Amino acid sequence: MVKVLNIISDANIGGAGRVLLNYIRHSDRTAFETIVCLPQGSLLSPALKELGTEVVEAPITPDKSFSPGDVRALHRVIKEIKPDLVHTHGSLSGRIAGRLARVPVIYTRHSVFPVSPRLKKGPGRAVNKWLNESLADGIIAVSPAAKANLVEMGISPERIDIVMNGVEAIPRKSPEECAAFRNKHGIRPDDFVLGILARIEPYKGHADILQALKILRDEGRAVKLLIAGAGTCEEEIRQLTASLGLESDVVFLGFVQDVASVLSVLDVQLNASWGTEATSLSLLEGMSIGLPALVSNYGGNPYLIHDGINGLVFPARDVSALAAAVRRCMDDREMLEKLGRGAFEDWSARLTAKIFAENTENVYRHVLKGAIR
């Protein structure tokens, strides 16, 4: 039995936490024992315990990658737990602590961000390369875009394994439940329903979606937009909705625990990210019920959604192209149904939680054999 200590600094249940939960649900518990170390009071802790996972709540700083005090605290945890492998989700402190304890270390890059100029060349690039490669025996990128992001910062591509995120199939709601949801939120029978499930942050593209919606409404098209999530610019997006005269066409749902209730009523899911996107779990969940998506060509989106196969891809920040993609779906229901079938088939073939767990464990085995390049 291989003992794996996962280290994650999240105070809330974000994307990395959901990925970890998916892994644990589908891990090979006959071969791998999973222990998770996280900050005291993390909302992820109860969810992990419900799965029967051993949890260590350590005195580390929530939502912070590095702190000297956190290195010391995590080093103590590692020495006490004595894992065969440390797997960090970001957490530079965890990587350093693992190295100090002389335990093999893997870390996962869950995100894609624009690379700072100082990391693209010169001393900054060299230091970043040394830091990342010397503190990890294996590096996991959750999409080809995440790998490219790391390579752009100087990390050798041979050191990086791509393990695409995967999700469990969400339970599609019954026609009666969908009808009740539609009635509750004022969705008319003839409305074409769009939805975005994401934090409301500038780089997620909500403003671009609203501008595209304005184009469609000015054409007299019956379109309803559901916005699920919260974030730092929610008030700004609400104000933009009002200024565009779209109050009756947009429903703000806030944070939604039961994402199936939203995804089940959509005609298409939207992702208009232009500043960060590695592998959208919401897109994967939609694919699991055969929901096609319209996505920007930023980050990991084009590796999930293949244009004309399981959705449509438009240039990031191109409002007219987004409106045109929606228009195509509204006008060609046969194409829309084909895209939905393609979404489910693609999810089944490569993006299930089980496949993700198996691929993660293959990296574990590879590292433990000392075969990482």
Image (cartoon, rainbow, N blue to C red):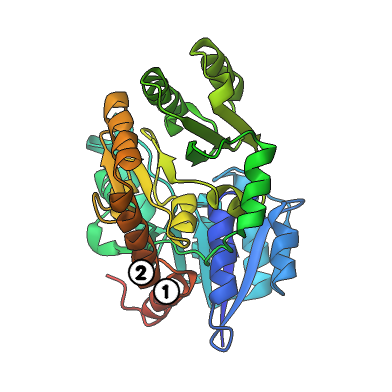
Callout count: 2
One can see residue 353 in this view: yes
Q: Where is residue 333 in the image (x, y as percent from the top left)?
A: 33, 48
Q: Which of marks 1 and 2 is nearer the N terminus?
A: 2
**Label 1 crowd (10 A; few <14 / some 14-19 / many >=20):** many
Q: On the image, which quarter does residue 48 sit in?
A: bottom right
In which quadrant is the N terminus drawn?
A: bottom right
On screen, residue 117 versus residue 218, left or right, reads: left
- Seen at 33% across and 42% down, the residue is 329
Q: On the image, which quarter does residue 344 sit in?
A: bottom left
CA gap between label 1 and label 2 equals 7 Å
- Seen at 25% across and 44% down, the residue is 152
On screen, residue 243 versus residue 125, left or right, reads: right
Q: Where is residue 82 in the image (x, y as percent from the top left)?
A: 62, 76
Vertical position of residue 297 compared to residue 6: above or below: above
Kind of residue at disc 1: Ile
Vertical position of residue 234 compared to residue 115: above or below: above
Question: Which disc number belongs to residue 355?
Answer: 1
Q: Position of residue 373 (x, y in %)?
A: 27, 70
The residue at which mark 2 appears reads as 350
Residue in front for this viewpoint, 145 or 60: 145
Q: Where is residue 163 in the image (x, y as percent from the top left)?
A: 37, 65
Q: Which residue lies furthest to the top in this view?
A: 243
One can see residue 57 in this view: no
Vertical position of residue 335 compared to residue 254: above or below: below
- Seen at 59% across and 73% down, the residue is 25
**Label 2 crowd (10 A; few <14 / some 14-19 / many >=20):** some
Secondary structure type for disc 1: helix
Kind of residue at disc 2: Arg
Q: Disc 1, disc 2: CB below 8 Å?
A: yes
